[in-house]
Amino acid sequence: MKIEKKTRSFVPADLDIKWETVEPLFNSLLNRTIDSKDALEAWLKDRSELDAVLEEDFAWRYIRMTCNTADELLLKEFQYFTTEIEPKLAPLNDELNRKFIDCPFVNDLDELTHGILIKLTRNALDLFREENVPLFMEIQLKQQQYQSITGAMSVLIEGKEYTLEQASAFLKSTDRRQRRQAWEAITSRRLEDKARLDSLFDELLSLRHQIALNADFENFRDYMFKALARFDYDVQDCYDFHAAISREIVPVLQEEAANRREALGIEKLMPWDMDVDPHGNPPLKPFGNGEELINKAIDCFNAIDPYMGSALYMMRKNRLFDVESRLGKAPGGYNYPLAETGAPFIFMNSANTFRDLTTMVHEGGHAVHTFLSANLELNDFKHLPSEVAELASMSMELISMDNWNVFFSDENELKRAKMYQLGDVLKTLPWVAVVDQFQHWIYTNPKHSSEERTEAFKQILAPFGNNFCNWDGYEEALGNLWQKQLHIFEVPFYYIEYAIAQLGAIAIWKNYKERPAEALAMYKEALKLGYTRSIKEIYEAAGIRFDFSTAYIHELASFIKEELVKPAF
């Protein structure tokens, strides 16, 4: 079952993507006369098609490069787009945006479907500065260096070489000596590149701050709030959210840490004690290899909804997965939508652990979102705000739990898996608050030194539990924890959305437990909207509130705690 690209009507089917072939198409759009509403809608569709073609071409360059960061040819192909096409597109896209907004027929478009697009286009016009184009290009290239540096990291454990993702599986060992050995090996390896990554980040910080100044902002934080089109909340809302997480979630996790220490029978919880099962159970093994992970995920999604299962099945048939960890592969995981094809590519670093199961269903939620929104009329309608994109994925982590029996035939292991997942739901919130607040500090204090940055991170982390364990003797490692978070290097300020969406996901799961068919139908209908409605309206379509107040956090955290103690859970 081959997934076919949509038939093109404006871009030549055999177009070889080079600047010399792309520029005439943009000039054609710029020079076209628009003399009616119908002509404007046709122009929007042609521009959308061109955007989709270029987005998918860039997507494959990025995907191939992250799958093998050591391949110089793949790097050069990625860099060609970044240096020879993208910078030249930026001023042309600005002109196209101006042509669209200045068109006398723009107000005749359907407000319900085009209102968000018009708002976003005006926002982009406000932000564009030609002098920032080369800075964005430089940033793109430097961000790739983070992938190359971290992708090359490996450690020796008991004489065998492992990627850091593979080595992290030892942190679940019931042998405390082995856990410590693995944790110290991973930590020492990260610290080897600490100065190199600090220097890289200093360069990124300087470039980002200059972009903000060029666009008439005092700092990059304020610039990014506008660039991310955060129309529905502001900086103070984020600070209030951090404080609410500290009040409502941290005490729960502190109690859990105390219970963990007691169950392990140790005087102090150390960093290598945080992932092992506290009751001495061996690590969960939900699958044996990457192929089995994909096949079981398809079965799991089929049990939830046949449409969802068929989405992952088609991806498998079309080789749209790369899931196993290996040397030279970039870190992390992602679901990359292929704009013209209407399907995504899932990339992850599986080391055959329980966490890889949750990563797969998370990225699978993104994948279903890609399929459900694929037929929206314009490519811009599929450019999702992160608060909506992560709602799709984090909800799937919880919705899928009732069908994890495909991964766990043993009832006790299934129960453990669900308990781990709900525990992780709560653990997500403080770390998100730390990463977000840390970035607020970084970009509103742009002249800081790397030493000041390390100290600021430790101070910000402290109220959120210092990861709920003892770091005596490992202070350097504690201050360096932020470097493992690729978002800080590659997608600044894309993180608070995880916490916002986590609350939404809990609410969707609560509805799903009470009214499964209705909740699932509303979830899918919300995802079909893409970004044709406001974030608040999309959450409402999913049957939940766009709300991250203290009261709402308390309500949903209480629900999670109640579920954890239910005998039948």
Image (tube, grey):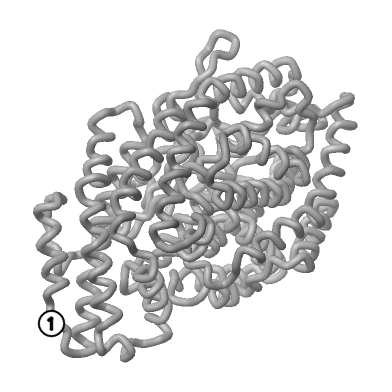
Q: Position of residue 64 (x, y in %)?
A: 31, 38
- How many numbered badges does the structure rendering display? 1
Q: In which image quadrant can residue 112 be found?
A: bottom left
Q: In which image quadrant can residue 339 be found?
A: bottom left
Q: Position of residue 28 (x, y in %)?
A: 11, 70
Quickly name the residue at label 1: 33
Q: Position of residue 417 (x, y in %)?
A: 69, 42
Rendered view: 80 above or below 9: above
Q: Residue at x 12, y 74 (%)?
A: 31
Name the foreground residue: 404 vs 488.
Answer: 488
Q: Position of residue 323 (x, y in %)?
A: 45, 37
Name the foreground residue: 268 vs 460.
Answer: 460
Q: Secondary structure at mark 1?
A: loop
* 13 with respect to 371 (left or right): left
Q: Is residue 104 in view?
A: yes
Q: Residue furthest toward the top?
A: 159
Rendered view: 345 above or below 240: above
* 487 with respect to 314 (left or right): right
Rendered view: 435 above or below 213: above
Q: Residue at x 71, y 23 (%)?
A: 474
Question: Within 10 angstroms of label 1, few (less than 14), some, or many (20 or more) residues?
Answer: few
Q: Residue at x 12, y 50 (%)?
A: 16
Dot 1 amino acid type:
Thr
Name the foreground residue: 201 vs 74.
Answer: 201
Q: Is residue 418 in view?
A: no
* 503 with respect to 336 (left or right): right
* 25 with respect to 146 (left or right): left
Rendered view: 42 above or below 565: below
Name the foreground residue: 94 vs 265.
Answer: 94
